[in-house]
Amino acid sequence: MSVDAVVFDIGNVLIEWQPERYYDRVIGEARRRVMFDTVDLHAMNDRVDRGENFRDVIYETADRYPDFRSEIRQWHDNWIEMASPAIPLSVRLLRQLRSKGVPVFALTNFGVESFAYAQTKYDFLSEFDRSYVSGHMKVIKPGAGIYAQLEADCDVAPERLLFADDRADNIEAAAARGWQTHLFEGPQGWAKRLVKAGLLSEEDAT
């Protein structure tokens, strides 16, 4: 089946997203483990990704856990250090696809304010033909609604979308709708998949 548009996840596909690594560096692994066992920080982040205010959610959570208040606030205050660095080959692949005239979309679990901030740090986040950001859409992957909204908006048949994401549950939800999918485990594998799909040459994908 041919591909009419390529859909990129962002976290761990175009930009590394490793909060645990950040906290291991700044507070040590032992305290980080206790904090993550005590506070469901990923659920907190899901609230932001569903469209709640970035600062308000994190500071409210921090105030509920005074033993970790300063550390939790860093999820907002030092957020860009968790969402870094960019993955250079993935960025090149995005730009090569666009240079070939292949429509490229983003489908990402991302907060409204945090995505706008990330765009000031990573210019390629403003280069998509269409960006589908969960915070604006009020639904997150792997919920069916986010995929349905993309399909309704982009005017591309589901079976002609090729989607890369680092999470198996997100990939499975897309595949269930007929999308072509790639479980992202590194940019080299993604490059090979784009070549196999006939979208890029071997030279383009290096």
Image (spheres, rainbow, N blue to C red):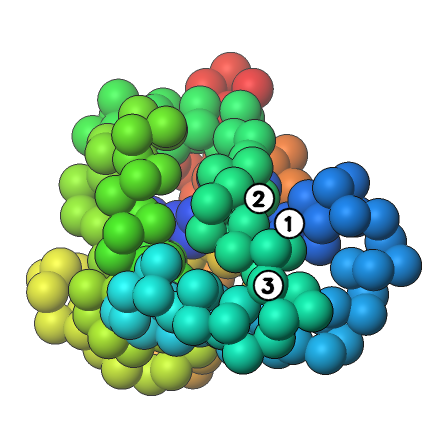
How busy is the neighbourhood of tag 2: few (under 14 within 10 Å), some, or many (20 plus)?
some
- Is 23 rendered above or below residue 96? below
Q: Between marks 2 and 3, how big is the CA–CA gap?
A: 18 Å
Give whichever of 195, 57 is nearer the camera: 57
Q: Residue furthest top?
A: 203
Q: On the picture, is 52 further left or further right than 10? A: left
Residue type at mark 3 is Arg
SS assignment at label 3: helix
Q: Earlier in the sequence, mark 2 or mark 3?
A: 3
Q: Secondary structure at mark 1?
A: loop
Q: Does residue 158 show up?
A: no
Mark 2 residue element: helix
- Between the C-alphas of marks 3 and 1, the distance is 20 Å
Q: Position of residue 135 (x, y in %)?
A: 27, 65
| Residue labelled with disc 3 | 69
Mark nearer the N terminus (3 vs 1) = 1
